[in-house]
Image (cartoon, helix red, strand yellow):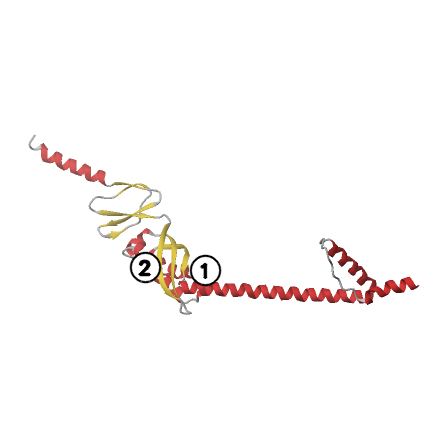
């Protein structure tokens, strides 16, 4: 019995070591394996076996990662101080490179995105940032993806979420927008007056060719004034308006 004790202990330890090498990798995960310090092909998903002591395993998530880029202080090309924040969507395509090429791919991608956001926004004017976000988002994605591609990371989308303007700039833009609206209103009003004058000129030409049209218009005006139910109506009547009636009665 005394000789069987150490042997049983060794057997138990061996069984535990063998069982400890069994790993379950989820569908969206991959196992990055180091065998005596050298990287081998990733394993998974499903049940895999990692040789105890000889192999070391690191789990890698392949799902889409949403990375919030905190607000960055930016001075635009036209010297306006603003705060810009964005969101970055990316995923790991090559687990081995994501572990081998960079120490911490999440932290490195975050720092790269912040630096690129400040750099790109600083090269643009404020009007471009406000009006051409799709173009700037595509430019940001191209730059970030160029640097993350050697890490085995695919950037799927970069989107600017919010641009915070100083209060004085907001007031200036509000005044500018109000002035623009007033300018458009004046142009529309002037265009309406011009069109009305053209119509009046056309009407005067028609009345000049047909004098009786003026008499009919005069009578119509009397009817419109009478519909107002005024007690007293003062309406000047030029003698020229009555001449057609006088001529008709004389004939």
Q: Please state, as top left, top right, bottom left or bottom right, where the N terminus lies in the image.
A: top left
- Looking at the picture, how far across and down is residue 117, in whole percent? 38, 61
188 above or below 62? Answer: below
Q: Is residue 145 left or right of residue 240?
A: left
Please tell me in which quadrant of the rendered image residue 184 appears: bottom right
Check disc 2: other Cα within 10 Å, few if <14, some if 14-19, many if 20+: few
Please tell me in which quadrant of the rendered image residue 109 appears: bottom left
Q: Is residue 92 visible?
A: no
In front: label 2 or label 1: 1
- The residue shown at (43%, 59%) is 137
- Looking at the picture, how far across and down is residue 72, in whole percent? 35, 61
Determine whether the residue tagged by mark 1 lies in a helix, strand or loop: helix
85 above or below 17? Answer: below
Q: Is residue 176 left or right of residue 48?
A: right
Closer to us: 116 or 60: 116
Residue 15's tag is: none
- Looking at the picture, how far across and down is residue 42, in whole percent? 31, 48
Check disc 1: other Cα within 10 Å, few if <14, some if 14-19, many if 20+: some
Q: Is residue 175 visible?
A: yes
* Residue extending furthest toward the right: 251
Residue 133's tag is: 1
- Looking at the picture, how far across and down is residue 128, in whole percent? 46, 64
Q: Which residue is mark 2?
A: 111
Determine whether the residue tagged by mark 2 lies in a helix, strand or loop: helix
Q: CA distance from mark 2 to mark 1?
A: 21 Å
- The residue shown at (16%, 35%) is 12
């Amino acid at each position: 019995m005394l000789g069987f004790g150490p042997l049983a202990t060794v057997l138990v330890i061996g069984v535990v070591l063998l069982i400890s090498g069994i790993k379950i990798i989820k569908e969206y995960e991959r196992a990055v394996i180091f065998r005596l310090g050298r990287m081998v092909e990733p394993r998974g998903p499903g049940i895999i076996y990692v040789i105890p002591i000889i192999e070391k395993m690191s789990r890698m998530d392949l799902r889409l990662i949403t990375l919030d880029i905190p607000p960055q202080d930016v001075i635009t090309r036209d010297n306006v101080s603003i705060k810009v924040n964005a969101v970055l969507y990316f995923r790991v395509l090559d687990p081995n490179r994501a572990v081998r090429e960079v120490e911490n791919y999440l932290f490195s991608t975050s720092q790269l995105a912040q630096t690129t956001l400040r750099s790109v926004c600083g090269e643009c004017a404020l009007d471009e940032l406000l009006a051409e976000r799709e173009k700037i988002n595509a430019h940001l994605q191209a730059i970030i993806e160029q640097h993350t591609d050697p890490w085995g990371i695919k950037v799927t989308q970069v989107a600017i979420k919010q641009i915070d303007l100083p209060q004085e700039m907001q007031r200036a833009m509000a005044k500018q927008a109000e002035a623009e609206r007033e300018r458009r209103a004046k142009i529309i009003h002037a265009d309406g007056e011009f069109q009305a004058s053209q119509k009046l000129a056309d009407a005067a030409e028609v009345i000049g060719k047909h004098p009786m049209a003026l008499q009919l218009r005069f009578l119509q005006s009397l009817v419109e004034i009478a519909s107002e139910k005024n007690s007293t109506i003062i309406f000047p009547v030029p003698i020229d308006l009555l001449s057609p009636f006088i001529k008709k009665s004389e004939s």
